[in-house]
């Protein structure tokens, strides 16, 4: 067993950090604040480069380290910093002393940063490669940063407005827009008076997309001159900042699954809770698993590396997990600028001021850059053009909206009622929270700050003159919930899950949800099991069935036998396909290539004749497109579309995988690579992990979203957890590619092969089990500040 001892200023007593063989750190402290201080130190020990980049990206400080190519992204990030009352901000997260917790956590990070100054050998190699140093944090940094959170739906609002602007009538435009995104529950979008997006600038949302983009590195961007700085202001369809052509805005595809099964329906006689949040694949992982033990605190699970506590896991009595509930938490307001004074915009019968804030952005190798940021009462101004200011109203501007920090309020909850009360302090992102405890109780709560829109529905931008303003927020107690349902289980998968009797039209929580495929599959499986086991939950998290793939195969099987040899061979490959996208399946490869490369584009062309409108629709709403294909098309036209796409898909597979279909497999195309952000600067570093062949697709419970050009995975479950509620040491998790972000660590990529075969490692909780699995003991001792 290895070990090390460090002095950590501010501790009240010694702290022990036991790192088990899977890289999970178990922190044992004499006080809760000592545990949080040690959590910050330990997070920096494993993830310092990631933490430093997170802070600099969020605060708009990238150009200071990486040069002028990052100025536009810095300016964009600063638009969305929290600028309200800081006392109200700290108070908004619940009755616990959030400021003290965050202060302790940040002090732990800073202690490790200081340690790397004294011992440069502890500094991750990324800093040497980029000739940078990690910076010290302030507690306010954690809460001021907003742009890492997932909120919605300004990208969709603007896309819908553009589609409507090109339609022959609002009804015609909305029918075409259904190809892009299905509205649910059924609802006719409200078109605000005077809305016309025909002449809106193409770069309208560039600032928003820059603020929410990940940080990328390329030799060209790192070498950008001051004169080229603002060229780096476009974001492509894959979320990469570029100086090339911008791509049509697309809503993020992040999601999640979770379920809780009551004892009456489990093989263990105890509840089982499962969680697998789906986010963008990163190296290091977005999530970090940790175990914190102190008087009054004993929680284990996953959180964000830059935040204290956890958001998914258990506290020794109750388990909890979350998925995104796609409530609409932002709106674009179009403000008429006073022709006589560009610092005023229309408000009622008069004018209101646009507040201009001047900030200096430090730039490596040169003087600071002066930027001016504009704000209306709605929020930051994204763009000014054509006598209008486009301002974004978002919950980010409200106290308490730092992503996931609201989880601190529920870490000690031991009843559904207490858990629900704690969720009154949750703002962003909007989520489905599931709960299960050792008494056998289970519960579901929708949580998040939900705007009240008395005059519109949030599906389109609105004039900013006051007629369509928000009227505060709905009381958290009015959001839907279910406690101890008769069904004996609860599940969510980002689908439209408002109860049938919920007043959706009145409260307008949101009308854009994930497609129903994952939720349908989960319900079918759980509904058919009356003795659900831990193994069943693990198998369901890795389930590769795709309802769209099965329905497409049924359409192919209904075709007459083709005379074209490629089409006939393709029909043979799909003859017995059942919708399971196994990584070794030739049929899975063919059906996915058929859909994403050939049939879906052809279908969009057939259903939307105007090329400029069609540019706004991809990738398209799969549910809407398949329904149109099945029921709306003339049978002859459908046969022509299917046949042409099938032959072309067979040709693509032959080109990519050879002439013999017996050698084809979905995993040969569909693969995961966990790419280090600096790979483009150091391609021989060996810091990338993969490729790992994988099954599934976006419509599978094992959400495996991929790029259609390379078939490389982009989003999915990098963290999975299945909790045996009450027999805690039988719980399991996986965090890919590993717990550590330090390339030299044994835990940098050790979990990748486990994840690749859809397996798990223990999430040990009891002291004896933790001690037996410990490989490294780190002792933290008090020292003078």
Image (tube, helix red, strand yellow):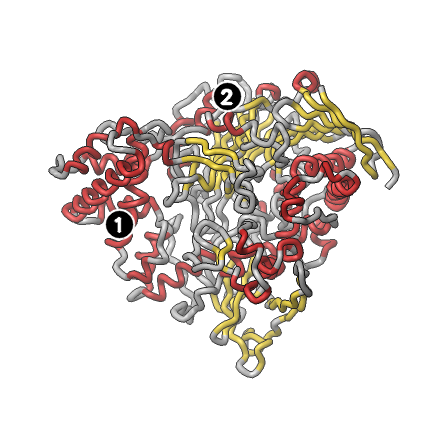
The residue that disc 1 covers is: 603
Q: Determine which quarter of the picture holds residue 309.
A: top right
434 over 403 or under it: above or below: above
Q: Nearer the viewer, mark 1 or mark 2?
A: 1
State the SS at label 1. helix
Residue 531 image point, x, y percent: 45, 18
Marks 1 and 2 sit apart, C-alpha to C-alpha, by 41 Å
In front here: 515 or 79?
Answer: 79
Q: Is residue 247 left or right of residue 28?
A: left
Lower sequence index among marks 1 and 2 = 2
Looking at this view, name the residue that lies furthest to the left: 563
Label 1 CA crowd tier, 10 Å (few <14, some 14–19, many 20+): many
Residue at figure coordinates x 61%, y 42% from the top left: 423
Above-or-below relation of 98 to 672: below
What SS does tag 2 mark? helix
Query: On the picture, is 718 further left or further right than 438?
Result: left
Residue drawn where x is 47% and y is 28% of the image: 756
**As displayed, is residue 473 above or below residue 122?**
below
- In percent of width and height, residue 758 lies at 47, 26
């Amino acid at each position: 067993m290895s070990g090390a001892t460090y002095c950590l200023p501010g501790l009240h007593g010694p702290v022990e950090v036991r790192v088990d063989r899977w890289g999970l750190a178990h922190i044992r402290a004499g006080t809760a604040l000592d545990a949080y201080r040690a959590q910050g130190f330990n997070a920096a020990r494993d993830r310092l480069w990631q933490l430093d980049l997170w802070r600099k990206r969020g605060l708009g400080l990238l150009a200071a380290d990486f040069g002028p190519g990052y100025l536009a992204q810095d300016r964009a990030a600063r638009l969305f910093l929290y600028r309200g009352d800081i006392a109200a901000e700290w108070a908004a997260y619940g009755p616990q002393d959030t400021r003290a917790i965050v202060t302790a956590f940040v002090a732990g990070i800073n202690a490790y940063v200081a340690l790397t100054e004294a011992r440069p050998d502890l500094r991750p190699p990324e800093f040497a490669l980029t000739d940078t140093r990690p910076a010290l944090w302030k507690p306010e940094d954690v809460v001021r940063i907003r742009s890492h959170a997932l909120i919605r739906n300004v990208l969709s609002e603007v896309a819908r407005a553009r589609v409507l602007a090109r339609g022959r009538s609002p009804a015609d435009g909305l029918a075409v827009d259904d190809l892009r995104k299905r509205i649910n529950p059924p609802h006719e979008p409200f078109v605000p008076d005077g809305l016309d997006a025909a002449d809106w600038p193409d770069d309208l949302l560039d600032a928003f997309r820059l603020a929410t983009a990940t940080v990328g590195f390329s030799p060209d961007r790192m070498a950008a001159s001051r004169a080229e700085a603002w060229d780096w202001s476009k974001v492509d369809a894959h979320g990469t900042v570029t100086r090339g052509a911008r791509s049509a805005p697309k809503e993020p595809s992040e999601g999640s699954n979770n379920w809780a099964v009551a004892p009456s329906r489990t093989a263990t006689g105890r509840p089982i809770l499962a969680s697998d949040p789906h986010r963008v694949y990163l190296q290091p992982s977005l999530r970090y698993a940790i175990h914190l033990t102190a008087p009054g605190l004993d929680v284990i699970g996953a959180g964000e590396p830059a935040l204290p506590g956890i958001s998914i896991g258990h506290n020794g009595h109750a388990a909890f997990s979350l998925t995104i509930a796609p409530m609409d938490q932002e709106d674009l307001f179009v403000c008429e600028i006073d022709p006589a004074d560009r610092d005023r915009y229309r408000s009622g019968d008069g004018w209101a001021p646009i507040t201009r804030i001047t900030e200096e952005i430090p730039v490596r190798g040169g003087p600071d850059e002066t930027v001016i940021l504009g704000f209306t009462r709605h929020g930051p101004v994204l763009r000014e053009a054509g006598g209008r200011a486009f301002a974004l109203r978002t919950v980010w501007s409200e106290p308490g909206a730092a992503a996931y920090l609201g989880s601190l309020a529920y870490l000690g909850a031991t009843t559904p009622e207490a858990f629900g009360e704690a969720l009154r302090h949750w703002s962003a992102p909007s989520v489905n929270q599931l709960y299960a405890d050792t008494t056998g109780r289970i519960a579901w709560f929708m949580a998040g700050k939900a705007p009240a829109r008395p005059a519109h529905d949030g599906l389109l931008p609105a004039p900013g003159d006051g007629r369509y303003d928000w009227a505060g927020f709905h009381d958290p107690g009015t959001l839907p919930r279910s406690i101890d349902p008769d069904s004996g289980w609860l599940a969510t998968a980002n689908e439209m899950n408002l109860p049938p009797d919920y007043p959706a039209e009145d409260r307008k929580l949101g009308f854009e949800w994930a497609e129903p495929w994952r939720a349908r599959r989960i319900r079918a499986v759980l509904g058919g099991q009356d003795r659900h086991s831990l193994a069943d939950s693990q198998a369901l998290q890795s389930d590769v069935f795709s309802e769209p793939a099965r329905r497409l195969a049924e359409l192919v099987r209904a075709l007459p036998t083709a005379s074209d040899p490629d089409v006939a061979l393709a029909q043979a490959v799909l003859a017995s396909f059942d919708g399971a996208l196994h990584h070794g399946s030739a049929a899975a490869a063919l059906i996915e290539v058929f859909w994403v490369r050939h049939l879906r584009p052809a279908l969009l062309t057939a259903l939307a004749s105007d090329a400029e409108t069609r540019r706004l629709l991809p990738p398209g709403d799969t549910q809407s497109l398949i329904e149109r294909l099945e029921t709306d098309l003339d049978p002859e036209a459908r046969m022509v579309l299917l046949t042409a796409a099938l032959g072309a898909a067979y040709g693509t597979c032959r080109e990519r995988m050879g002439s013999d279909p017996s050698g084809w497999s979905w995993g040969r195309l569909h693969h995961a690579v966990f790419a280090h952000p600096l790979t483009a600067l150091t391609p021989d570093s060996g810091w990338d992990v993969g490729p790992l062949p994988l099954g599934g697709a976006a419509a599978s419970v094992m959400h495996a979203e991929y790029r259609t050009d390379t078939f490389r995975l982009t989003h999915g479950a990098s963290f999975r957890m299945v909790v045996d509620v009450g027999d805690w040491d039988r719980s399991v998790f996986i965090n890919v590619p590993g717990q550590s972000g330090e390339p030299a660590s044994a835990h940098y990529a050790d979990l990748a092969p486990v994840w690749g075969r859809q397996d798990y490692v223990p999430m040990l909780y009891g002291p004896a089990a933790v001690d037996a699995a410990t490989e490294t003991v780190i002792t933290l001792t008090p020292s003078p500040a």
